[in-house]
Image (cartoon, rainbow, N blue to C red):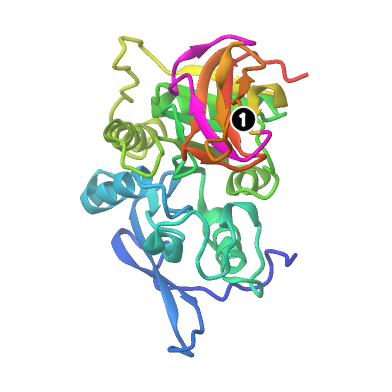
Amino acid sequence: MATTETPSRIVCNIDFDRNGRQAGYCRAPLSRNTAGWGTVEIPIVVVKNGTGPTVLLTGGVHGDEYEGPIAISRLAQSLDPAKVQGRVIMMPAVNMPAVLSDTRLSPVDNWDINRCFPGNPKGTFSQMLAHFLDSVILPMADISVDMHTAGHSADSALSTNMHYLPDPAMREKTMAAAAAFGAPYNVVFGGVDEGSTFTSCVERRGIVSLGTELGGWGRVSIEGVRIGRRGIDNILKHMGVIEGVPDMSQRDGSAATSHKMVRDPSAYVFAPKAGLFEPTHDVGEEVVESEVAGYLHFVEDVDVPPIVLHYKKSGVLWFGAGPGRVTRGDSIGVVMEDFRDNWS
């Protein structure tokens, strides 16, 4: 894997040190049968004024996740430079080929960019783009908010998320930012194959890293967009980039975000075979250890009874299966429990 000292092949026409609003494109080379010198144009808006921290907002890392790109685009079109103290870098559609094809994976190389950080400038398109984010964009940031949903693969309770950080000071700083964002939940988690994600890349640079999960099932969540748009305003206020106090109130009457965790493999329910999955709970519902999580049906086989799947721990359902038909090894449920500051 290439080091971040290797120059990026992606060209960006933005002067990141100039005050005011700049809107343009990062041009990533993509030679095609019909365009030998073709490029992919990735939109970027930078608003800077005076001195202050830099907030990086990214959406569209996966092309079938919509709430983040909508929320960031709205901010990019409305943010007044005169009201900013610092810099806001907004990239609402990072993985443009995937965004245009409405897919999680890039149609160029069939890679999940969020599994190939820190990337490689001489690698595939996704590796080249990951390297650009890590080597060119990230070093400017004081905080990164990378906005995701569950896409077509699942549904999710509306939440921010972060990894459990061994450094207590950075863990406290990140949890404070998550509380300021003001989603109903913040999930401290250890996921599947996390070492090559954008979140891990940000953390390795010592930058505050927040992700989001603001819906899923391949549609735009009205509440997910509202929480996302309010959340990035809240982050700008929390960082002192714009004036104001973050609004962290919840629609259920709660005053603040509920901190949860997904700490070990027992939080996950996986499909043991391919079949048609019938869930028993919606995301956000409380579930109990040993309770039925759902039924895996084999409707193509006469008289074959369904497999009954059970939760392995009690808590609140963070993720639920999206498509009805699942493949062996797919995660069809993830349970979050109340956060405890003890990862041992």
- Residue 294: image x %, image y %? 54, 22
Tell me which corner region of the image, top left, top right, bottom left or bottom right, holds residue 122.
bottom right
* Viewer-closest of 170 and 120: 120
Residue at 62%, 40% (x, y): give it: 274
Q: Give amino acid for label 1.
A: Val
Q: What's the magenta bit mostly, secondary-structure-wise?
A: loop
Q: Is residue 262 visible?
A: no
Residue 279 on the magenta segment: yes
Q: Residue at x 29, y 16 (%)?
A: 251
Q: Is residue 32 visible?
A: yes
- Considering the image in quadrants, where does the N terminus appear? bottom right
Residue 27 sits above or below residue 329 on the image: below
Per the image, label 1 sits on a secondary structure element best described as: loop
- Highlighted range, magenta: 272-290
Vertical side of 96 occupied by 310: above or below: above
Report whether 278 appears left or right of 270: left
Residue at 44 percent across and 79 percent down: it is: 39
Residue 259 falls inside the magenta stretch: no
Judging by the rendered image, the residue that carries numbered circle 1 is: 304
